[in-house]
Image: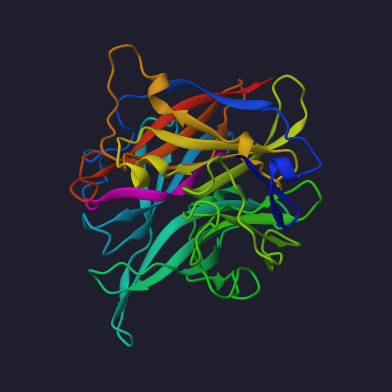
Amino acid sequence: MAGLLLGSTWVHADESSKQPETRRLQLKVVKTLAQPVIGRNTPGAEKIPGGFEGGNSVKVTIDDKPEYHFFAHSYPKLDWSQSQLDHWVSNDGLNWRHQGVLQAPYKDEQTGLYHIFCAPIPFYDEQDGRWYLFYGDFGKQEQQWSSGGTMRCAQSKVPGPKGVNGPYDFPGREIFVPGQSHPQNVRPNSNSAPFRVKDGRWAMFFNPDGPLNPESGKWWVALSFGPTPRGPFKCPEPCEHAPLIDPTGYNENPMPIKVRGPKSGREYWVAVFDFLAPEVTAFTPKNVFGFSWSDDGVHWPAEHGQVVNVDDGLAQGERGWWRGAWAIRTPHQMIDEGDGTYTVFFTGGTHENHFADFRAVGMVKVKLIEE
């Protein structure tokens, strides 16, 4: 049964006085590249045998020239014992050059723990003309995963669009305060870029570690709100999960943007996200990511959710490069190409065993269908 998040109360559709809306937006896959755009043989990738995972991508015009900027955390080892923040640049989305390592893992001699970094999310603040990089800072033993990190924000030292290239003032500042930005009994492990919702507030999705979604027993996401894109962010009480897809749970790393409906021209908020159900329920090959939309950026009804199959964009007879139950990992935000299509970069595994080989970067073209 579908659920709705109405205000701060979780109810089922048949318990609400409002009937659920029919889906008005869908995502259609136009074309999927069968080969990665960044693979193990791409110059600059030789020092990261584990490849890439979480992060986000943006398209920036600098000196009248558009560029794609890909931010992700990369793995200097095949396992997850270390990770660093990486930055790559491309003129066409197909040919990439390594711009540099933004923040490398290091060992804290006082605690004996490694600081490793994940999910760099770039955001350009129009109010002060600066780029900000939101990211997670984790402390862990070299061969043992420890979930839950500190969400931080580093500011570019260079103003204007060119500041996307940094340098950034690492470690920056902590942006999520326990008991205020998120519940005291959870620790966030990733967040989205800030985005402005219909009522004027700024919002940010986050994935917490801690009590699981009571509906599904699986992952959940929540929203924290602030008066500016720099915060301070505060989670409403009770801090509820937002069901981005039905069945609820299995959702990670939503990447929201505001769009115009292709038929009506009205405003919508849309998000793509890592939909984990195939990998955690049956460990079946995973060739999907999630999509959902909202009328106001705050309420994301479960029935708006859609499972997007990237195989739909392959040419007849082609087989995609992704492999295994963890194949399609984190989709980056939809990049508006101005011609009715959007580019989505995503990371994914190249081997049945996720820890055995390089995690590459793929590209899929999609478009919005408005009913």
Residue name at image x 78 percent, y 46 percent: 198
Look at the magenta stretch and give its main secondary structure.
strand
Give the farthest residue toward the front.
14
Nearer-the-camera pick, 223 or 259: 223
Left or right: 169 as drawn, with respect to 267: left
In the depicted view, which residue is nearer to us: 189 or 346? 189
| 238 sits to left or right of 115 | right
Q: Residue drawn at (58%, 44%), measured in percent from left and top?
A: 244
Residue 211 to residue 349: above or below: below
Q: Can residue 206 be seen in this view?
A: yes
Q: Above or below — where is 339 with respect to 216?
A: above
Foreground residue, 230 or 267? 267
Can you give x and y, in whole percent of width and height, for residue 278 in the image? 37, 39
Q: Quadrant of residue 266?
A: top right
Position of the N terminus by quadrant: top right
Q: In this view, does 150 lie to the left or right of 224?
A: left
Tally the marks: 0
Query: Which quarter of the figure is the C terminus placed in?
Result: top right
Is 93 included in the stretch rendered in magenta? no
Task: Tell me which segment is drawn in magenta.
Answer: 47-62
Residue at x 68% of width, y 58% of height: 229
Residue 56 lies, in percent from the top left, at 48, 47
141 sits to left or right of 329: left
Is residue 60 rendered magenta in the image?
Answer: yes
